[in-house]
Image (spheres, rainbow, N blue to C red):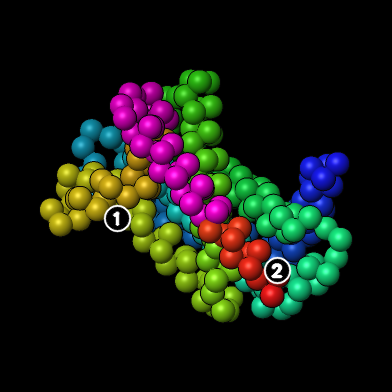
Amino acid sequence: MKIKYMILDSLTMFKRCGLIALRKSDALATSIFVPTFMMLLFVFVFGEAMYVGSYDFTNFIVPGIILTCIGQCATVTSIVVNEDLTKGVFDRFRSMPIAKTAVMNGHVLAAMARNIVATSVVFGVAFLVGFRPQAGVIAWLGIVGILLLYMLAITWVSLLFGIVVKSAETAGTLAVIVTILPYLSSGFVQVESMAPALQGFARNQPMTPVIDTVRALSLDMPADGSWLAAVLWCTGIIVCFYIIASQVYRRKMTK
């Protein structure tokens, strides 16, 4: 019965977070607008000046743009969670007979839904500006799977960030981190073309294998070992940040 009530409470919190998202539609619009603007800028302004080997430039950068979109959505999650904490909403929930994990679960579900909507729109714009994948059904299932796994990983990062910082403004700085990292990966240029000092970092950060996997699957190319690295990175981040965020959240709720 406890699991049943936990699920019902989590769905109630998800509905609440969904209503908040509707009231803050400008935040979702920003999560769509920023990566879309960057895609248009790269495709129509910088495209001819950037070398990506034998790849079509639009096909090459779309995976990096998608991760930028997911990062923008993560910033919204971080801000909303922090507002719940700083405005005393968590304190009100603490006095109610609901599952303690329901609040976090609701935020996670809402973040995933927000990410799926924003990513779908950005994918749609990508098709309009020339994105032409050659992926089959199985490859598309792989793309969806790895992106959902990455969304979940970045969601738990954003949850922890929103809980530990002291203001919504500080929570918004998460955007700086998740926006810069795709540029220091294989998202927009080939790693081999980077300065030697950056190549090691670019090859060994989590966004590069995710981008490489999505790109390979979308272009019907072998993913080699990138898919395994992507899964391991995402799974490791989910486990680590879930444990830390849960502990910090419980501590906040018992004060």
Q: Amino acid at mark 1?
A: Leu
From the top left corner, tell me how far across and down residue 140 is, in percent: 51, 27
Q: Residues within 10 Å of mark 1 (few under 14, many from 20)?
A: many
Of residue 69 and residue 124, the one placed in the foreground of this image is: 69
**Is there a contact, CB below 8 Å, between mark 2 and mark 1?**
no
Of residue 18 and residue 166, the one placed in the foreground of this image is: 166
Q: Is residue 213 visible?
A: yes
Label 1 residue SS? helix
Residue 197: name its quadrant.
bottom left
Label 2 residue SS? helix
- Per the image, the residue denoted by label 1 is 184
**Side of 5 where 89 appears, left or right:** left
Please name the residue shown 33% across and 23% down the image. 222
Q: Judge depth for marks 2 and 1 and give the one in front.
A: 2
Q: Which of the marked residues, 2 or 1, is nearer the chain's N terminus?
A: 1
**Side of 151 where 114 appears, left or right:** right
> What's the magenta bit mostly, secondary-structure-wise?
helix
- Per the image, the residue denoted by label 2 is 253
Q: CA distance from mark 2 to mark 1?
A: 37 Å
From the top left corner, tell me how far across and down residue 82 is, in percent: 62, 71
Residue 127 colored in magenta in the image:
no
**Side of 40 where 15 appears, left or right:** right
Extent of the magenta region: 216-243
Residue 209: name its quadrant.
top left
**Which quadrant of the rendered structure holds the C terminus?**
bottom right
From the top left corner, tell me how far across and down residue 186 is, in percent: 30, 46
Please name the residue shown 29% across and 55% down the image. 184
Is residue 106 positioned above or below 20 on the image?
A: above
Please name the residue shown 13% across and 53% down the image. 196
